[in-house]
Structures are given as structure tokens and as C-alpha cells.
Amino acid sequence: MLRINSPSRHEREMADYVKARMTELGFEVTEDDTAPKIGGNAGNVVAFKAGSLPGSECIFLSCHLDTVEPTDKLEFVVDGEEYRTNGQSVLGADDKAGIAAVIEAVESIVESGEPHGDIELLFDVCEEPGLLGARHLDPGSIRGKYGYVFDSQKPVAGITVSAPTHDAMDIEITGRAAHAGMAPETGINAIVAASNAIARMKLGRIDFETTANVGVISGGTARNVVCEKVFIKAEARSRNNEKLDAQVAHMIGLLNEEVEKLGATIDVKHVREYSTFRWTKEDEVVKIASAACARLGIEPSLVDGGGGSDANVFNDAGFPSVVIGVGYDNAHSSQEHMAVDDLVTAAKYAKALIQTASEWRK
């Protein structure tokens, strides 16, 4: 799979790969109509195999088919201990290692002939730019009650039981252009308004569950022109929505203040990208995941997450879900690597999860 170039919106070859593998293993395989809705060339793939143990709990395992770039002309090395690249591209273990673990797990179960409950696998597209595939997946097509998203770094088999709400802000500040040498006093510099506001903002780690960032700022036309327009991309995240609302109000409030001082104008587009979830060891979705750990002699590791994943979308849709650690390191960088032993453990855990659910009574 590492040799398949599958950046977001170009997952066709990966979709065909998993469809063929799942069909070979006797799964009922469908692909939805998400592709044209997101400007991509492949839709979400759903694979289902009916079990032989009636009354067991049906869960779904989820992975995403896309990777960040660059992965074109990827050259990777397997030295017996880990998978890595030559340093010129990402590896793509996020999330192909997750896919590999899940496929190996179901292949092992099918080939062994052991009894099992219903198995459902969701392979979604375009996760990296904003969970787009999961957002467009019809919740009515999901048969599983609980979801396990194989899409996280270490610890392997770690169970991410919470994640933040994520708010995105796109801001446009409009001042007035003027000649910077001949008549600067007639202009209103949008850069000044933006920088004054940003300098006053609380950013970075706000507290143990809240973060904020200004990630992009651009504008201006020439060094000798008072800048008329500035564009800012900012975000805030928190596992506490009251704290998040306060942080967003703080950021937008300062922008409004500084814009008003200079006589500029501002347009703010504020969007809630996804919402928080929080589970405890007493919740059924976590109990099943923890029992799968115990099956392998692994002490359950419950993790509070700081980023978003497809689990946020599934939880919003009413399917209790957690994120499972696959074990890759330095994702989204040319130093991304994946230990072979960790991938083996991830596959064993995926199998244990299916086996545990197969024995779990509804």
C-alpha cells in the first residue's frame, strides 16, 4: 500500500485495493457517492461480513484511505525493525498502517475459520483536510453500534477517550490603500490592525484542555503601498465548550477592538468543524476496547486527545467511538516511521477487538 500514491481527493487506487481485498475475504463491499460531493475520485468504502455468532455486538473498525503529501515516487526501506522513507516524502503510515492492521486482523479470522460476530469496516476518504469523507458518509449505512478508529500514534492499542471541539476562523480585515511615501496618513493599514490584535491574544496552550493558534496571515500588494487587506486563518480547540466559546470570543473581540481603533472593517467567518466527545472506563465502548487489551495482556491506556478524527464525526452521528493507537511516529513529516513490531501488535489488537465484540452480548 505504501507504493500507492493516495493524497486527499485522489484515493481511487487505494479504494480499489481495499475493495478487492475485502471481496476476496468474502465481505459485502459497497462504495458511496461521496466523490463528486468533495471533488474527489473515490467514495467511502464500507465492507460487511455477517457473523456466525447470533446476539454478539456488532462494532465497526475505521481507517482513512488518504495521506498527506508528498508521497509521489515514495522510496521506503524495511530494515527488519521499521518502515521508513529516504527522507524525501512522508511514509503514509497515517493511515496505511491502520488499514494494514485491520486487513491482517480480518484475514487471520476468516482464514482460521473461527466463529465470529458481524464485522464491519469503514474506509473513508479525504480525512486529512477536515474529515470530509466521514462527514458525507450516510449514518444509515452503518450497522455497527460502537466504532474504533485506527488512526493515532503511540501507544499502540492506546484508547483515545476524549477529543476537543474545533472552531475555525477565517478573518478578512479591510483598511484603505495609500502611497506609503507620499500620503501614508490617508491610508488605514490592515496589517497594523491585525498585528495589534494578535499581539494581545492568548495563544498556544491556554490550559490542559484548551489551545489556540493563528496559523496563516497574508496580505498587501507592495512595500510602498499602505496595506488595504489582510487575511487571517486562526483556530481554537477545547474539550470544554464553555472554555472554547470564551477563547473564540476573546480572539474575535480583540480583532474588532483594533479594527475599530483604526477605522478599518472586518469580516469573520466562524465555523465549528467538529464537536468534543468524552468517554470513561465505565462506558461500553471503552469496556470492549479495554477487554481487548486484556486479551493480549496489555494494560489499557486511556488517552485524552488534542486533535480531531473521524471519531468526532461518528460520535456526533450517535455512534459511540474511540480512537485506537496504531503506533506510527512523526506523522505528516519526512521522518515518519513505523516499527514492524508495533504494526504486528496493532494487527493483533484489531483481531482481539473483533474477537472480544464477538463474545460481547447485546
Image: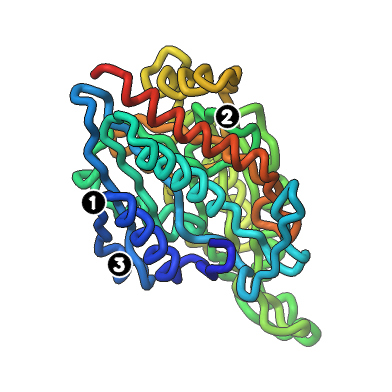
Q: Which residue lies under the disc numbered 3?
A: 37
Q: Which residue is mark 2?
A: 158
Provide the residue designation for mark 1.
Answer: 28
The one nearer the camera, 329 or 305, is 329
- Residue 132 visible within the image: yes
Determine whether the residue tagged by mark 3 lies in a helix, strand or loop: helix
Image point (38%, 52%), residue name: 123
**Residue type at numbered disc 1:** Glu
Residues tagged 2 and 1 counted as in contact (Cβ below 8 A): no
Left or right: residue 199 versus residue 240 is right
Asked if the residue under mark 3 is in contact with the one under mark 2, i.e. CB atoms within 8 Å, the reply is: no
Q: Nearer the viewer, residue 46 or 180?
A: 46
Residue type, numbered disc 2:
Gly
Q: Quadrant of residue 144?
A: top left
Q: Residues within 10 Å of mark 3 (few under 14, many from 20)?
A: few
Q: Does residue 66 lie above or below 161 as drawn?
A: below
Q: CA distance from mark 3 to mark 1?
A: 24 Å
Residue 193 image position (x, y, % from top left) = 66, 60
Compute the Cα span from label 2 to label 3: 33 Å
Q: Could you say where residue 204 lies in the image, as x and y percent from the top left?
A: 70, 41
Rendered residue at 38%/31% (across/down)? 354
Give the Cα distance between marks 2 and 1.
Answer: 29 Å
Q: Nearer the viewer, mark 2 or mark 3?
A: 2
